[in-house]
């Protein structure tokens, strides 16, 4: 006896008809992949769980409003929802300026904080403030690409997908952003 796997389309259809267990099966089927995808973007397990839950809530809301049209593309739909929610989170985080000197750590200067003396620490903090002010002077499209690359750790392919531009455009914006930062900061000109 072979076990027949019910398709996502059938599960969505059954959920629309009121079978709550179908939603549970969809969640179980897709959760691992969705959580991995979210975590790869936000790098925080708690935020990943929150975004994951919010994605399923949005799906249920779309179903309840009758706005979801099943065309055999449930997986791309739910992945697009989590992508958008993760990007929204990153944008909100960018606006709130939660990025601190501590989070950057030794990635930029290569010197752990505990090995710096007071003067070096003060210089480092001033450098970060100068860089932050310089980034604010960049065009918004360059700021976005720089943020997604440097702080969110996205690849250029992911940046292109998230911003809706081609990969060459994302690469170009990053190159211009770095060049403009060098000019603004007077470094390596």
Image (tube, rainbow, N blue to C red):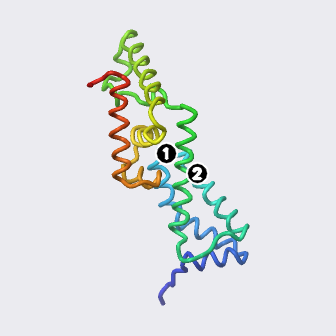
- Label 1 sits on a secondary structure element that is helix
Left or right of 65? Residue 105 is left
Considering depth in this image, is 157 or 41 the residue closer to the camera?
A: 157
Nearer the observer, 138 or 54: 138
Callout 2 touching callout 1 (CB < 8 Å): yes
Q: Quadrant of the C terminus?
A: top left
Lower sequence index among marks 2 and 1:
1
* Residue 23, image x, y percentages: 64, 69
Q: Using a 10 Å C-alpha cutoff, classify the residue at mark 2 as few (fewer than 14 neighbours), some (14 to 19) or many (20 or more).
A: many
Left or right of 17 on screen, residue 180 = left
Residue at the image position 57 percent from the left and 55 percent from the top: 52
Return the x and y of residue 4 as percentages of the image width and height: 51, 84
Image height of 49 relative to 76, above or below: above
Asked where in the image residue 61 lies, by quadrant, the reply is bottom right
User: Which residue is under mark 2?
Assistant: 51
| Residue at x-position 43% and y-position 17% | 126
Q: Alpha-carbon distance for marks 2 and 1?
A: 10 Å
Residue at 67%, 74% (x, y): give it.
15
Q: How many callouts does the rendering have?
A: 2
Residue 140: percent from the left, percent from the top? 48, 39
Tell me which corner region of the image, top left, top right, bottom left or bottom right, holds residue 46.
top right
The spot of residue 137 in percent (x, y) is 46, 29
Residue ranking furthest to the left: 188
Is residue 61 shown above or below 144? below
Q: Which residue is mark 1?
A: 42
Q: Is residue 89 left or right of residue 146?
A: right
Residue that lies at the very extreme toward the top in this rendered image: 119
């Amino acid at each position: 006896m072979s076990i027949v796997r019910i398709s996502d389309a059938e599960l969505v259809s059954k959920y629309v008809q009121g079978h709550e267990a179908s939603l549970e099966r969809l969640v179980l089927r897709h959760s691992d992949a969705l959580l991995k995808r979210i975590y790869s973007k936000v790098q925080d397990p708690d935020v990943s769980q929150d975004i994951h839950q919010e994605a399923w809530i949005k799906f249920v809301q779309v179903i309840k409003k009758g706005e979801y049209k099943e065309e055999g593309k449930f997986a791309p739909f739910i992945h697009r929802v989590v992508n958008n929610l993760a990007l929204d989170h990153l944008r909100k985080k960018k606006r709130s300026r939660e990025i601190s000197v501590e989070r950057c750590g030794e990635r930029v200067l290569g010197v752990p904080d505990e090995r710096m003396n007071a003067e070096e620490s003060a210089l480092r903090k001033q450098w970060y403030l100068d860089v932050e002010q310089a980034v604010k002077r960049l065009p918004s499209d360059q700021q976005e690409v720089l943020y997604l690359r440097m702080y969110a750790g996205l690849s250029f392919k992911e940046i292109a997908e998230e911003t809706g531009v081609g990969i060459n455009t994302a690469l170009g914006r990053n190159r211009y952003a770095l060049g403009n930062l060098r000019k603004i900061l007077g470094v390596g000109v």
